[in-house]
Image: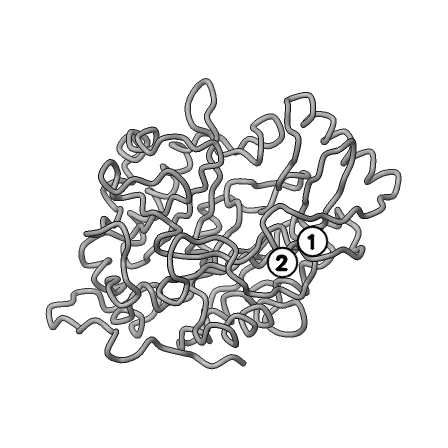
Amino acid sequence: MLSFSLLPVTALALISSTLAADTCNGHAELCSRQYSNVTFIGAHDSYAVGDGLADNQDKDVTAQLNDGIRTLQLQAHNASDGVHLCHTSCSLQDGGLLSDYFGKVVSWVSSNPNDVVTIVLTNPENLPVSTYSSILTSSGIDQYMYQPSSSAIGLSDWPTLGELIDQKKTVVAFLDYQANFDTEPRLIDEFSNMWEDAYNVVDASFGCSVNRTSGQPSAQMYLINHYLDSSYALGGTQFWIPNKDQLNVTNSESGDGSIGFHVGNCVSLWGRNPNHILLDFYDAASNAPFNLAASLNGVSAPTNTVTAGSGATASVTSGGTAKVSSSSLNSAAVISLDLKKGLYVGLSVVGALVFGIGRTVL
């Protein structure tokens, strides 16, 4: 089991004698821990729920949070009636309005005031940050959002979980592109504060090289994309779908290709644990991801039992063999399909092409 590692003692915030919170994210020990020194399990494309081609989870956000997910990754797209959560294109997968999703998060957060939740909002259409400000207000999530004093926060300058909880600012939100501290300080610039490793990975070697950042990785938090895809090419279109056949391995606690394996690679390179671990169908291996996070955080394992939904056990893709994509979108392998899967995937791609998508990223 990987050992629990702390930032240097000199980097830890002093514990206030007036700290009211006595349990933070389920553990008293985490109340004095800085946000930047905790590992959270996250749901990649949290809104993409179902057993379809473009889905990544099989439980809605409320169930995800109840199970112990504390990082929610989203992808926003503009539509005629507002900002939707869609997978590459709203014609391919539409998870509904962002405001409705935020409303569910607000309901959960208000009922669970001693838990800090992170939102990682991706902005592939480069919508101006002002587009999101009105949604934050109308959904009510703005009242729970942490607002830093500067656009870039040093590793040792983040508040503790206890401080966030005492201040009733239990939602920490990042925006990957078009963040603007002067316009909307509650949407923190992700890559000024946190780097990510590669995504759309199709090989279980799970290296931990920096893939995206605009700062110094050694001085930032980091997020790892721990989900295994299968890559396809059809009609000049490249796309990736979750490799469900490998979920029990990918989402397991230890062994080659597991979460622990990926984390171990990262610790060997960076000397500290990741802050956020994104998973597809996080429930496929029951409590394994949450048990590992507890170990990394130096706390006891959770007592609730996470059950797998139908999407986490269904077989959709061939295990196949492919090459790792070491950069975000530069390489893909073509995996042969049987007739049934080929027809299923092919129809989806034709639909994507009709709507003008040249490259489908799931």
Q: Secondary structure at mark 1?
A: helix
**347 relative position to 93: left or right:** right
Report how far apart the C-alphas of labels 1 and 2 lie in the structure: 7 Å
Q: How is the model colour-coded?
A: one colour
**235 relative position to 328: left or right:** right
* Residue occupying the point 79% across, 57% down: 321
Indicate which disc residue 289 carries.
none
Q: Are marks 1 and 2 in contact (CB under 8 Å)?
A: yes
Kind of residue at badge 2 = Ala
How many numbered tags mark residues here? 2
* Residue occupying the point 62% across, 64% down: 206
Where does the image place residue 322, in percent across and percent down from the top left?
76, 55
Q: Nearer the viewer, residue 38 or 211?
A: 211
Where does the image place residue 133, in percent across and percent down from the top left?
29, 33
Q: Looking at the image, is 42 positioned above or below residue 240?
A: below
- In the current view of this chain or complex, which residue is farthest to the top? 80
* Residue occupying the point 68% across, 72% down: 256
Kind of residue at badge 1 = Thr
Q: Looking at the image, is 186 positioned above or below residue 298?
A: above
**172 relative position to 83: left or right:** left
Crowd rating for badge 2 (residues with CA inside 10 Å; few <14, some 14–19, many 20+): many
Q: Looking at the image, is 214 positioned above or below residue 184?
A: below
Q: Quadrant of residue 252?
A: bottom right
Mark 1 sits on what residue? 313
* Residue occupying the point 40% across, 76% down: 299
Mark 2 sits on what residue? 284
